[in-house]
Image: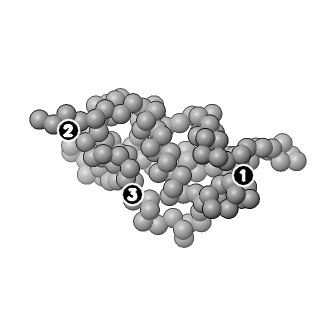
Amino acid sequence: MKSAAVLLPQEVARKAFLVWLETRTDRSDWSAVTSAAELWRDYADWCEQRPLPASCIFTQCAFGLQLRAIGCRNSKDGRGLRRWSGVALKSAGEIIAADERTVTDSCSICPICGGPLIGLFVSEPSGQSENSMRAA
């Protein structure tokens, strides 16, 4: 029997973040400025729609560190509201089939529940739920 790769929660979170980043944001215009709250809300909503364990989703602080790591810059506007430069959310029309892509091996195991990770989504350990095996 082939042994499956085990991903740590932070590795799963990083891969999920990269899928969110690729499918939901546009980083082609470095002069783009987006509210930190708007980016966080979109990421949190996106993660909530997927059956990821809470330990495999970045906290708001870790989310900011990931944005900084890819070269985005954070600042405050004149009203003291936080924002990120170098990243913008795509419009609904721009979010298409890219959201169906997967970045992980189909033979990875969730370190939290022990269920196989299909793409970035945890399938039921018993393999009963087809919806939970939908790839992101």
- As helix, strand or loop, the secondary structure at mark 2 comes to loop
Q: In which quarter of the view is residue 93 placed?
A: bottom right
Image quadrant containing the N terminus: top left
| For residue 96, side relative to residue 105 (left or right) | right
Q: Amino acid at mark 3?
A: Arg
Tell me residue 40's x, y (percent).
62, 45
Q: CA distance from mark 2 to mark 1?
A: 44 Å
Viewer-proximal residue among 35 and 27? 27
Q: Which residue is mark 1?
A: 85
Q: Is residue 44 left or right of residue 78?
A: left
Give, as a three-letter code, the residue at label 1. Answer: Ser
Percent x, y of residue 136: 39, 53
Is 66 situated above or below 101?
Answer: above
Q: Secondary structure at mark 3?
A: loop
Q: Quadrant of residue 89?
A: bottom right
Q: As drawn, is 2 to the left or to the right of 122?
A: left
- Characterize the local packing of mark 3: few (<14), some (14-19) or many (20 or more) Cα atoms within 10 angstroms: some
- Dot 2 and dot 1 residues touching (CB under 8 Å): no
Q: Residue at position x 71%, y 46% from top? A: 73
Residue 109 in percent (x, y) is at 29, 35
Q: Which mark is residue 126?
A: 2
Q: Earlier in the sequence, mark 3 or mark 1?
A: 1
Instruction: Count neighbours of disc 2 (C-alpha within 10 A) and say few if under 14, some if 14 to 19, many if 20 or more.
Output: few
Other residues around mark 1 within 10 Å, as few (<14) / some (14–19) / many (≥20) = many
Q: Relative to residue 136, is residue 77 drawn left or right?
A: right
Classify 41 as above or below 113.
Answer: below
- Which tag, 3 or 2, sits closer to the chain's start? 3
Instruction: Identify the residue position indicated by label 3 in the image.
Output: 101
Give the color scheme: rainbow, by chain, secondary structure or one colour. Answer: one colour
